[in-house]
Amino acid sequence: MSSSTAVATLPTARMTQDAATEAVRTGVVDGTSVRRLAQITGWSVGWVSELAKEFRAKADLPAQPSRDELDALQECIDALEGLDEAGRRRVLLYLSDRFGAR
């Protein structure tokens, strides 16, 4: 039985710096996470993160949310299931204030 799930192939070796730079540039525009870009290119998360930060600044793109922010957001979403309507509204208002348009 074949699977319909697509899996990206990781490089067997680290990309050249030029190829990795272009992959990061493209990934930043597409919204690919730094961690994923590091996996794809074979370069360190630190190197990819600094390069991505430069590209975001040049393209006037927003900074990528930190892992802590994303974890907090997921906890809030998970908590919505157990709340009554008034509680959900309070959480959604908080999320809107915290993560809304800046």
Image (tube, rainbow, N blue to C red):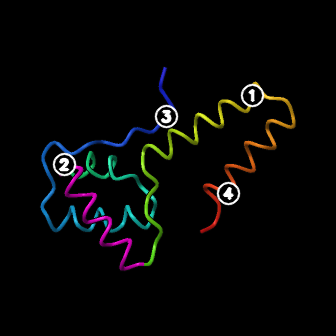
Depth check, mark 4 against mark 3: the one in front is 4
**Residue 98 picture location, percent across and down:** 62, 55
Question: What span is colored magenta in the figure?
Answer: 43-59
Q: Residue 58 in the image: x percent, y percent?
A: 36, 80
| Circle 4/circle 3 CB separation < 8 Å | no
Mark whose residue sits in front, 2 or 3: 2
Amino acid under label 1? Glu
Query: Which residue bears the numbered disc 3?
Result: 5
Give whichever of discs 4 and 3 has the lower sequence position.
3
- Of labels 1 and 3, earlier in sequence is 3
Q: Secondary structure at mark 3?
A: loop
- Which residue is pictured at 87% across the width and 35% down the height? 85
Asked if labels 4 and 1 touch by Cβ distance under 8 angstroms, the answer is: no
| Residue pointed to by mark 2 | 42
Cα gap from disc 4 to disc 2, whole angstroms: 37 Å
Give residue 99's quadrant in the image: bottom right
Query: Mark 4, mark 2: which one is toward the viewer?
Result: 4
- Disc 3 residue type (three-letter): Thr
Which residue in the structure is indicated by mark 1?
81
Q: Which residue is drawn at the image coordinates 42% and 50% (left, top)?
A: 66
In three-dimensional space, the C-alpha distance between marks 1 and 3, rounded to whole angstroms, equals 28 Å
The extreme right residue here reads 85
Residue 97: assigned label: 4
The percent position of residue 31, horizontal first and vertical second, equals: 45, 59
